[in-house]
Amino acid sequence: MHLYGRKDVDKKALKGARIAVLGYGSQGRAHALNLKDSGFNVVVGLRKGGTSWKKAKRDGLTVAEPIEAAKGADLIALLVPDMAQATLYTEIKGALKPGAALLFAHGFNVHFSRSRPARISMWC
């Protein structure tokens, strides 16, 4: 087994990238804050006025509705519960720019064809 650490990370790979984190539960919050603390341009996509919207704002993050967060993003992390992923993907897919990377926290919806990005590269 190979363990990756800080020395293995190439921060230049995302330099200048807009990163949209959709969802602000345990995974979304951790990812968004970590990326922000690492100096990246992060926007969190949430339902306007909800509890998570207020929490993300209090945490000092830029917040927008999911479609607006996804527009122009180079990396979109879909970090919402499984039962909401397929619907959210359908809502944002028209806003994804060509060549953007779409990250799923796990591949349930992709594997079972509930979300079908146009071009998929799967890493295991």
Image (cartoon, rainbow, N blue to C red):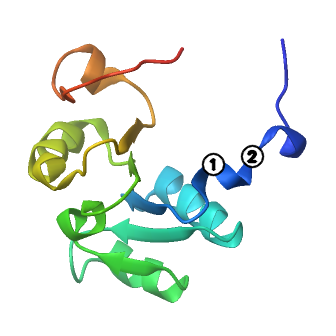
| Label 2 neighbour load within 10 Å: few <14, some 14-19, many 20+ | few
Regarding mark 1 in the picture, which secondary structure is present there? helix
Name the residue type under label 2.
Asp
Figure quadrant of the C terminus: top right
- Residue appearing at x 12%, y 43% in the figure: 87
Residue 61 vertical position relative to residue 122 in the rendered view, above or below:
below
Where residue 75 appears, as percent x and y from the top left, is 42, 50
Residue 65 quadrant: bottom left
Question: What percent of the width, then of the height, locates residue 26?
Answer: 51, 54
Q: Residue at x 69, y 71 (%)?
A: 37
Q: Dot 1: within a 10 Å radius of its alpha carbon, few (fewer than 14), some, or many (20 or more) residues?
A: few
Tag 1 residue: 13
Quarter placement of the N terminus: top right
Residue 14, relative to residue 56: is it above or below? above
Residue at horizontal 49%, vertical 69%?
42
Q: Quadrant of residue 35?
A: bottom right
In the shown orientation, is residue 59 left or right of residue 25? right
* Amino acid found under the numbered disc labelled 1: Ala
Residue 22 appears left or right of 10:
left
Which disc, if any, is residue 10?
A: 2
Residue 29, percent across and down? 52, 62
98 relative position to 101: left or right: left
Camera-side residue of 17 and 43: 17
The answer to which image quadrant residue 102 occupies is top left
Tag 2's secondary structure? loop
